[in-house]
Amino acid sequence: MGSLLGDWPSYNPHNFSQLRPADPSAQPSKLTPVTYHPTHSRTLPPPNQVISTETRNILLRQFYQKPEEKLRPKRAASDNLTPAHGSKQLRGAFADGSN
Amino acid sequence: MFRSNNLAARVFERQILTPRPGASVNLVRHFYENLVPSCTIYDIDCPDHSFRKFTDDGQYLVSFSRNHQDLIVYRPTWLSFSCEGEDCDSHSLPQKAKRFDSFFTQLYCVSLASSNEFICKDFFLYMESHQFGLFATSTAQSHDAPTTEGAIDGVPSIERITFYLVRLEDGVILDEKAFCNDFVNLAQSMGVFLYEDLLCIMSLRYQTIHILQIRDSGNLVDVRNIGIFCREDDELFINSHAHCMGILDKSKLDDLSAHEVANDVQHHQVTQGTSLLSGIKQRLLSFIFRKTWNEEADPTLSCLEKDNDEIMLLFQRVQHLKKKFYFHFQDYVDLIMWKVQFLDRHHLLIKFGSVDGGVARSTDQQPAFFAVYNMETTEIVAFYQNSSEELYSLFEQFYDYFHANSRNSLHASFISSHSNNTHALDQLWCIKNKTNNISQFVKKMMTSLPCTCQSQSPSPYFDLSLFRYDEKLISATVRHRHSTEHPIKFISRRQPNILKFKIKPGCGLCFSMFGKPAFACASTPALDLGSAPMTTISYCFLMFRSAFWLIDTTILFFILNLWRYPGCYHQCFFSLPMELPVPSLLEPQKCDARYPNNLIRKACPFSWTIL
């Protein structure tokens, strides 16, 4: 397409639809850029998400995670497979406790 | 990575090229390949003190008087002189170069120890952010001290150990902390660890970890004591419930003490004044219990679970517990804390071992354990034996985090270790592959944990990616070594056959400083420094007097601009390693405004070593 920003994806399908190419001889209908936008919202972050640096350094994280890793297969055998994000919940519990 | 080995070309390159993100310090350290020690001065009369160490920022030289009672601090004020003429190289050094005062100015002499106390020569910790130094004095050690309440048998006792916090700028003693009838391992600062503004002191005799904070004003403030009690209010709680538990009944204690010798088991508990184990021990035992309980005793356990035979499962677990925990219960109870370090502001790494090995240096034969303790939640997070391969894999990958360098200390994060340097890692793997007994190898590596604070020199000359040297003769670890016959060679890492410089330690101290810069040639041929006489201190120092024999006019112009300000050229050059001031060739008159003296001084961590 002719325009610089025409074919970049955007969350709002109406963005960039008003762009007109600089070249006046071009026909508007052919060169209206198509805006790509997502058709689902699975990849949107949760509205209250805050991204911050982990306060614990990597060595301490290893010390905390090793026993959890050992516990996990044991629980899977007895609890009919914990869900995929089960381990993340455990870690969250730890973080809340020590922060 | 510089394209050329020539110093001036590197300076210009540095002016126009941006280093890779996060690698600017690494890039600047490459200048040390060009600036190497090149000269030694012999036969210098120096004061009869026992020189201890340069501080890592190069601001002070710490020394103690021969009678170990006074602290004398010098400020390194390096010799500077200029030379005009065609052939500066052949000029010999001026007469003032042979004087100690040309290099060092005495700032003050402060008496730290009184009559029967002596300053511990091996002990010195430096807090760079405030320029505070921590020193220790102690009285003589006595091995057969009477057993007092709470003290561990088998650990010697020192009548009085005092820690002094001194502001090195002017020698004012800001605060002191005394320990009476106690024992702290002062050799090479092993019993004390400084992390940012927190200090932890391991009292071996009373099995307590004292956590102190160094405030900005210079006060040493008690934060907490970990040992008998873990939380600050534990003591209050136990005392208020003592009447209920009937444990602190004094009359009962008197009866028991008579049977102390007969029954070893009760001994430890009784000497603590209660029949409870100490807080830290309780935390440790409960952690081991829970860990053992949750462990899979048997791979066949899973099929037992499928059969839903819960009683069988429970039986297996109890058997496992008996074998792994109760069988060793008394050994766990008898463990004492040996050494401690900070991993971050809330976590401690504590080494446990048996009473016999507490004070001895070589602890290879004794089993030892490591525990990670969270001071805030007072919980043990991890527990490993010293032969644990899991702990070794963490040691191999994350050794830099065991060193717990605070973010304030810039150059300490660049000490070469096997976690941040491929050459060091190669060396480690070489040793590992040669060994037959992996367990012995792991134990040997684990003896370096917990790390001793400030035990490694941050000098770029020890950077393994810049130089190759014989680690048996010299290394970054600060400790006294026997001097060798042969000079110690430092070979450039990136140009494998080029010898950069040699150092002959001789006897006593040899201070290495920056050497002659290489302008016209690729590298400076190293001068054999020869051997130093037995009774003197040898110096190698910078000779920045080679300005006028340069051929290249642009470089000459560059140097001429520096020469406008003869007073500050020296400081300019000293700031070379970290913050190279590149004078603009178009506007020479703005040179001094860009590099005010105090800024240069602060930006420059010197690279001194006491060999």
Image (cartoon, coloured by chain):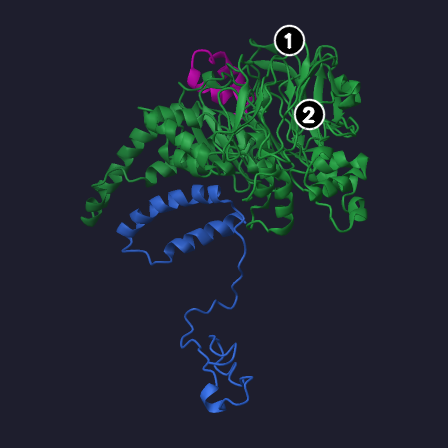
Q: Residue at x 36, y 28 (%)?
A: B432
Residue B235: give x, y in percent of width and height: 58, 33
The chain under label 2 reads B
The answer to which of marks 2 and 1 sits earlier in the sequence is: 1
Per the rendering, the mark at residue B541 is 2
Assess whether residue B267 is covered by the magenta stretch: yes
* Residue shown at 62% from the left, 19% from the top: B122
Q: Using the image, determine if residue B4 lies above or below residue B280.
A: below
Residue contact between numbered discs 2 and 1, judged by CB atoms under 8 Å: no
Where B544 falls versus B113 (above or below)? below
Chain B color in figure: green
Q: Please tell me whether residue B364 is drawn above or below residue A64 in the rendered image.
A: above
* Residue at the image point whose x is 43% and y is 34% from the top: B425
Secondary structure category for the residue under label 1: loop
Other-residue count near label 2 (Cα within 10 Å), few / some / many at <14 / 14–19 / ≥20: many
| Residue B565: in magenta span | no
Residue assigned mark 1: B534
Q: Quadrant of residue B290?
A: top left
Q: CA distance from mark 2 to mark 1?
A: 20 Å
Q: Nearer the viewer, mark 2 or mark 1?
A: 2
Bounds of the magenta segment: B247-274
Query: Which quarter of the rendered picture does the C terminus of chain B lie within?
Result: top right
Q: Relative to the observer, which residue lies in front, A24 or B67?
A: A24
Q: Which chain is blue?
A: A
Do discs 2 and 1 share a chain? yes
- Quarter the N terminus of chain B occupies: top right
Q: Nearer the viewer, residue B588 or B356?
A: B588
